[in-house]
Each structure stands twice: as C-alpha cells, then as structure tokens.
Image: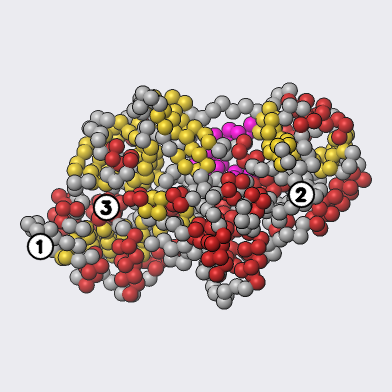
C-alpha cells in the first residue's frame, strides 16, 4: 500500500512547530556546546535538524534515567504510582533511534507491560527525520535500521533542499499533515535519491549473515582477552545505548523512617556489582565476561529473546568510549580469524505473554499468619493476602516464586515452599542472609508485607506423570522442592517410584525434619539423608558426605526417570555431572537457578545468564536447554 506523502517547505517549519506546541510539549535535537541533545523546543529556530547524533538517545523520554515506581506511607500503604504523563512530540528522531524504541517496546510492552513506559508511548507523537548524511561512527545499514525508516513513526521527514518530504505513518500523523500540499513525483524521486546517496556513503558495516552463530562459535576467541585489557568497565557505552534497558531498584525513606519511595535507576551490565545476587555472590566478576555479555547481548541475545535488533548501529558507544571499543572492529576481527567452526544451538526462550490488570510493580498486602523456625537462621512464614478475593484467586505451580517487599528496605525473590493445593495461605521458607530477609526475621505474626507474584517457570510436574522421580536437594534448596513432594504425595497414583536425596552441612541445618516420617510413609518413596559433618555431641544415624555420595545407595536408574535438583551451584554442578556419568541424559535433568533473580518480570536485566532471563525463562530449566549456553550456569 503506497505511503501518503506531502511536502513541508522549510519556510513554513516555524508555523508547523507552533501548531504542535499548541497541544503538546515538543522535544527535539538542540545544540549543547559542540554536540547535540534531545531537549525542549521553544520555537522552530531551536531545532538543529542538521545534527549527526545526540549524546543520549530519546529513550530517556520513555524509560527515565530515574523513575519512582511507587511511594509508600508507613509499613504498607501505597500512596502514589508514577508521575502524571502529558502529551509530547519528539521531533527529528533518526531511524536508528526509532528502531531502538521499537525494540524497547518488545521489552516493556509485551510480557508484564510496564504501565509507566506504556503511558508515555501512548501520549507521544514521533516525527522522524531520515538521514541524508551518515554519522561518523554509525553502521545502521548493517541491521536495516537506517538511513531511512519504514515504521515506528507518525510522520517521517526527508530533507530535499528547500523543503521536506513528509510521509504519513499513522492516523494521528495524517491529522498533523492536514493542510500540507501533496508531494509530487519529482519530490519523491529527490527523496529516494538523497537516501540512496546516504546509503552508499555508509562504509562501516558488520557484514555477517548470522552474528549470533559467529559469536557463539567464538565464545573463547582471544579477542575477548584483548578487550579485557582495554575496557575500563565505566558503563558509558550502556548509558548512551538506545536499546539498553537494565536498571536497579532500591527503597529510600524520609526522616520518619516510615514513608518513602521505590525508584528504579539505569544500571549497567559493565559494572562489577550488577551481577551480585543472593548471599553476596557475583557471577560475572571478570571484565572480559562483562564486555562479552554486552556485545553478545547487543548482537544476538536481544534478538533471541525479543525477536528485535539489540543494536541499531547508531555508533554512540564508539563515540563516547575513551578507548574507542568498536563492535564493528570486534566482529570484523573475529570474522577475519575465527575459531574452527562447530555446531551451535541458539537458545529459544519459552513463549509467555502475561498482561495483568494491575501494575506489576505494586505489591499486594499479605499478612503473616504463622512463623515456624526451621534452623537457627531459616524460618518458614505462612502468608495470606489481606484481601480475601486476591487470596481466593491466587494460584501457582510448584517451583515458582514471589517477590517479598519490606517497605523501606526493598524486595527479594523467594521461591514458594508450599503446595498450591492449600488455598487459604502459602509458605516461604527463608534464610536470613540479606537486608530484606533479615528485616523479615524481625517481624511477628500479624505483621504485613508486600507480595508480587507468582512468577517464573516451575518444576515439570505434568511431564513427570507416569515416570519415576528422583529429587536431589542441598541445604535451603529443599524449600523450592518441597512443593514437588507435596504435589506427588497428593497424586501418588500418577507417578512411578519416588526417591528423595537430601544433604545439608550439619544435622542442625536440615529443613522440614518434622515432615521426614510423613514423607517416608508415601507409597513407593525412599528418603536418603546426608550431612557434610557431624558436630560433637550430635546424634546422627544416616550418611556422612556430600549429597552425591548417596548416588550409590539410590535405586533410581535413567530409564523412565525425571530428576529435579536445587541447592548451591557447586552442588548442582556435581549432581548433574554424577547423573550424566550414570547414564542420565540432559533432557531428564531439571535444575533451579532461583538465587540469580531480581525484578521478577524480565525488565531489569540483572538475572541474565547469557541469553537467558532466569526470572521468566526459569528459575527451573531443563539442563538440555542451558548446558551449551555461552556463559556457564554453575
């Protein structure tokens, strides 16, 4: 279908901008010293439509550098959600940045739509500006994200000398073009000639048919070690990137120590602490790993997850990097001297689109109904939502998690340790090791917390039906697996033989000890226990050694068996190795990576392991799906 096109004489630009400003705030490229930024436009004279690129991309008008998710007053009262959004026009947006916004739409508007980003997108008119001259470090033609745009705009302008060709991209754009003269055939020819001339001048390219396959074949390429010595891990590249979306969330309180707010702030995968997870573990401490993560994310992971470009070739990262680290040069160097080719499998995330009626950021009130001490530092809390209707509608699968909020402290993702068959409450078994969990440990029955969820992918209880089940747990890892035990117990005739192997550091560190006799009475079920050490004076009549020493005692064999495991990463690593050596296949093994999570809804980026978002693609994974990831899982 032909695009409607009009012309806007440059002499009439002032009147056109004034018409826009009558109803909306207008932002566009304006000069800042010797460079350009997107900023407020008082009149058409402020616009610098001859700009090459801006310091920051226009994503800042949709995904704010810092933004309040909600405010709270006292322990649990939510007093405000986000800021009021007015109508705005972004004028003169280049094709690369428009394509970047379309990529961000996949992050923020699909699964668990972000209400703040959505409100700004819905209240914004995009007037694009096609490029008639390449920018110094741009390589947009590598991804078909420039120099011209074909979608994502309300109006698209192309400079053809004394006027602009104005193409219509939406019904709203057509209204704005009312009164403009139709473009002639000569105008359209001039537009096409200008764009072709610009295309021919773009000499910087990533000329690889499948960048993802090339990078996956060269995970251990020596180029990454070279970059480690160059990169300063300053995070500038991610700050100026138009598709980077990662952020951190932290609570702030006022002087009353009761009222406060929960903002999110841009963060960077280049920072050491970005991958810090539960129990103070940093799973990406090395600069080579971090720059590899960034380049892989831009050129392959983003597309694997969102089916959209993660890099649009704007060149800002090159322009602002004090070491001039350049994705084009990196890919070309690898392509010129690649590792021997090998077969690779690109990860495909599970399909999931969830659109809740309420904001996914705002917790529901939940009351602590009971507290049961499991060990000296681990407690089971029984919760019920304060609103009976919320509790009645609440359901979940074994292995998924909630976000638990202590307002003024923060929130933490914690797996549910009860079975959904119990409808009037749910349990979380929690070790007090961080700010949120230590604050929770100070609460009493009747106190209120915030709960978001449930989130994630749980244990394959449906796939396990008709099969034997082997459950291997270590320490606190038994908590996410307890729902599997309860689920099988309630449906015992639907499963084959059931074996539970559980290890802890000492007998005093074992969870749910009062339930062991009950589990032993489940038909065709065997429970094996082990500890690393037995302190003096403690009675222990079971195995001593790490949990894998129980493999010689178990009856489970690979035939018709599914294995599920959760515990410390080092434990799961040797559990998987041991079972593979005994003939189990990667397709039979499921692991939980729950402690590597943050926001819970695939928005903040903290939980990424290679192309995987643990919070939504997991936390439970089939080992076959993740064993060949470019980044080690444990």
The residue where tag 1 is placed is: 541
**Separation of marks 3 and 2 at Cα, in angstroms:** 54 Å
Q: Is 117 contained in the magenta span? A: yes
Q: Main secondary structure of the magenta part?
A: helix
**Separation of marks 3 and 1 at Cα, in angstroms:** 21 Å
The residue where tag 3 is placed is: 476
Query: In which quadrant of the rendered view does residue 179 lie?
Result: top right
Q: Is residue 515 left or right of residue 90?
A: left
Query: Do the numbered discs 3 and 1 sit on residues whose CB atoms are within 8 Å?
Result: no
| Residue at the right extreme, as displayed | 186
Q: Looking at the image, is mark 2 or mark 1 earlier in the sequence? A: 2
> Which residues fall within the magenta stretch?
101-123
Q: Is 580 contained in the magenta span? A: no
Query: Do the numbered discs 2 and 1 sit on residues whose CB atoms are within 8 Å?
Result: no
Residue 237, x across and y down, in percent? 59, 50
Note whether residue 634 is visible: yes
- Taking the spot 49% from the left edge, 58% from the top edge, the residue there is 287
Residue 557, x across and y down, in percent? 28, 72
Q: Secondary structure at mark 3?
A: helix
Note whether residue 387 is visible: no
Quarter of the figure with the C terminus: bottom left
Q: Secondary structure at mark 1?
A: loop
- Taking the spot 20% from the left edge, 66% from the top edge, the residue there is 545
Query: In which quadrant of the rendered view does residue 402 lie?
Result: top left
Query: Do the numbered discs 3 and 2 sit on residues whose CB atoms are within 8 Å?
Result: no
Q: Secondary structure at mark 2?
A: loop
**Separation of marks 2 and 1 at Cα, in angstroms:** 74 Å
The residue where tag 2 is placed is: 148
């Amino acid at each position: 279908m032909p695009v409607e096109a009009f012309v806007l004489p440059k002499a009439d630009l002032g009147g056109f901008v004034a018409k826009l400003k009558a109803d909306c705030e207008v932002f566009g490229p304006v000069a800042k010293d010797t460079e350009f930024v997107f900023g407020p436009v008082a009149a058409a004279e402020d616009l610098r439509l001859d700009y090459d690129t801006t310091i920051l991309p226009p994503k800042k008008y949709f995904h704010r550098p810092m933004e309040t998710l909600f405010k709270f007053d006292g322990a649990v009262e939510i007093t405000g959600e986000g800021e009021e959004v007015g109508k705005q026009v972004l004028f003169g947006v280049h094709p690369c940045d428009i394509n970047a916004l379309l990529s961000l739409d996949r992050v923020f508007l699909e699964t668990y739509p972000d209400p703040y980003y959505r409100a700004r997108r819905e209240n914004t008119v995009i007037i694009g500006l096609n490029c008639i001259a390449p920018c110094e470090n741009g390589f947009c033609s590598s991804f078909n994200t420039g120099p011209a745009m074909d979608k994502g705009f309300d109006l698209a302008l192309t400079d053809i000398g004394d006027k602009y060709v104005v193409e219509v991209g939406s019904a709203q754009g057509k209204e704005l073009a009312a009164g403009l003269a139709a473009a002639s055939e000569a105008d359209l020819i001039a537009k096409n000639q200008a764009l072709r001339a610009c295309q021919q001048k773009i000499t910087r390219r990533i000329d690889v048919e499948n960048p993802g396959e090339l990078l996956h074949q060269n995970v251990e390429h020596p180029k990454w070690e070279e970059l480690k010595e160059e990169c300063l891990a300053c995070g500038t590249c991610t700050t100026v990137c138009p598709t980077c979306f990662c952020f951190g969330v932290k609570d702030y309180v006022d002087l009353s120590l009761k009222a406060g707010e929960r903002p999110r702030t841009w963060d960077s995968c280049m920072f050491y602490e970005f991958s810090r997870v539960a129990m103070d573990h940093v799973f990406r401490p090395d600069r080579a790993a971090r720059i590899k993560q960034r380049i892989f994310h831009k050129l392959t992971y983003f597309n694997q997850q969102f089916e959209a470009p993660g890099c649009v070739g704007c060149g800002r990262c090159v322009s602002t990097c004090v070491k001039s680290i350049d994705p084009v040069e990196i890919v070309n160097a690898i392509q010129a001297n690649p590792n021997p080719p090998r077969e690779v499998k690109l990860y495909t995330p599970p399909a999931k689109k969830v659109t809740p009626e309420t904001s996914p950021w705002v917790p529901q009130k939940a009351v602590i109904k009971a507290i049961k001490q499991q060990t000296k530092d681990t407690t089971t809390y029984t919760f019920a939502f304060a609103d009976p209707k919320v509790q009645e509608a609440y359901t979940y699968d074994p292995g998924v998690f909630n976000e638990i909020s202590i307002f003024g402290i923060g929130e933490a993702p914690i797996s549910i340790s009860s079975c959904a068959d119990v409808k009037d409450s749910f349990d979380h078994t929690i070790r007090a090791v961080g700010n949120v969990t230590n604050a929770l440990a100070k609460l009493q029955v009747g106190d209120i917390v915030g709960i978001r969820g449930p989130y994630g992918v749980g244990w394959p209880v449906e796939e396990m039906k008709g099969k034997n089940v082997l459950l291997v747990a270590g320490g606190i890892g038994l908590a996410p697996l307890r729902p599997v035990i309860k689920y099988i117990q309630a449906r015992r005739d639907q499963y084959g033989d059931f074996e539970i192997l559980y290890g802890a550091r000492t007998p005093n560190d074992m969870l749910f000890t009062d339930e062991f006799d009950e589990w032993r009475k489940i038909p065709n079920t065997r429970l094996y226990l082990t500890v690393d050490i037995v302190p003096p004076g403690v009675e222990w009549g079971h195995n001593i050694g790490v949990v894998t020493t129980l493999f010689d005692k178990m009856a489970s064999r690979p035939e018709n068996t599914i294995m599920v495991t959760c515990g410390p990463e080092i434990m799961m690593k040797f559990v998987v190795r041991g079972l593979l050596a005994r003939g189990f296949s990667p397709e039979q093994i499921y692991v939980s990576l729950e402690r590597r999570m943050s926001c819970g809804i695939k928005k903040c980026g903290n939980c990424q392991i290679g192309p995987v978002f643990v919070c939504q693609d997991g936390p439970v994974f089939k080992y076959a799906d993740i064993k060949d990831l470019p980044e080690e899982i444990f």
